[in-house]
Image (cartoon, coloured by chain):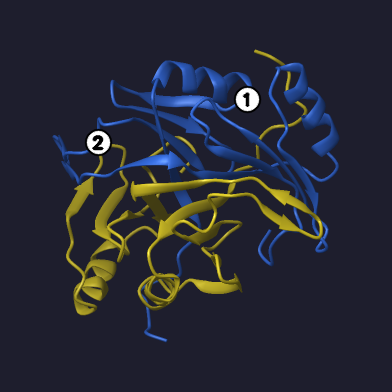
Chain colours: A yellow, B blue
Amino acid sequence: MTVRPSAIGGIVETSLYVANLARSAAFYEGTLGLTRISEDERLVALDAGARSVLLLFQCGATQTATTTPEGVVPAHGASGSIHVAFAVPPGSIDDWRAALAGDGIAIEGLTRWPEGGESLYFRDPDNHLLELATPGLWPNY
Amino acid sequence: MTVRPSAIGGIVETSLYVANLARSAAFYEGTLGLTRISEDERLVALDAGARSVLLLFQCGATQTATTTPEGVVPAHGASGSIHVAFAVPPGSIDDWRAALAGDGIAIEGLTRWPEGGESLYFRDPDNHLLELATPGLWPNY
């Protein structure tokens, strides 16, 4: 393998593209308890725990490059239903299922993996496929 | 705020949708040095460091639910250019820029943020917008 300058130390920013920033930010704050750390007319950034940041981009607002005083953020943008999984503690899936049901959110799947982790599947307001996952799914989680 | 069963402890799975699984897996292994941890005909999963897993899904292969012996993974799938940022150590951006240039990869942007972090932007084979970012970009990174 080619020698790289460093190991990659995790994924910092995960992006979703949404039709209504205010609606989506309220969902992630209210339903998942994430904390808003930045916002402007094209983006809401949420602290998703550990070193993870969830970026909610207004659909269509990033199709051209964004010029800031510090430099250029190149164009990007997607449509459809993106999958994101969030870490939750061992043994918390049943409580999360009850909490989501209490919010009126439909549970689309609950999987208990042979490696020991559990996954709960549901949707955000833009039909993105969300998962709450306990440790044991992957060699590094 | 509504009381949640637990705090979300980070994002475990971040997804990209790609036209050619083998080509994309080779890119992420060779260019970023990620390690393949699982694969089948619809998915390659890569250890992206810390507790982060990068999921590469074959475009079109997840538009219907996937039934496994353990349960159902609901449908998802997106098109377009998704943004993902990976953590790299402080002071490593110039070396990464040289390494990517050595691989023939065009650098689309280099930003030094007022908070102290640096971001290097480039593309994967499907035009997804990738970023290598040093700490200092966010309150939690």
Nearest to the observer: residue A134 or residue B32: B32
Q: Is residue B51 visible?
A: no
Label 1: chain?
A: B
Helix, strand, or loop for circle 2?
Answer: loop
Locate residue A4: give its quadrant: top right
Q: Residue A95 at x, y = what percent?
A: 27, 70
Label 1 crowd bin: few (<14), some (14–19), many (20+), radius 10 Å:
many
Nearest to the observer: residue B134 or residue A82: A82
Nearest to the observer: residue A41 or residue B9: A41
Label 2: chain?
A: B
Residue appearing at x 25%, y 59% in the figure: A122
Nearest to the observer: residue B51 or residue B141: B141
Measure the alpha-carbon separation of dots 1 and 2: 26 Å
Residue appearing at x 77%, y 31% in the figure: B96
Dot placed on the residue nearer the N-terminal end, 1 or 2:
1
Per the rendering, the mark at residue B62 is 2
Q: Is residue A93 above or below residue B39?
A: below
Per the rendering, the mark at residue A62 is none
Residue tagged 1: B33
On screen, residue A60 versus residue A11, left or right, reads left
Q: Residue B7 at x, y = what percent?
A: 45, 70
Residue appearing at x 57%, y 40% in the figure: B129
Locate residue A103: give its quadrant: bottom left
Callout 1 amino acid = Gly
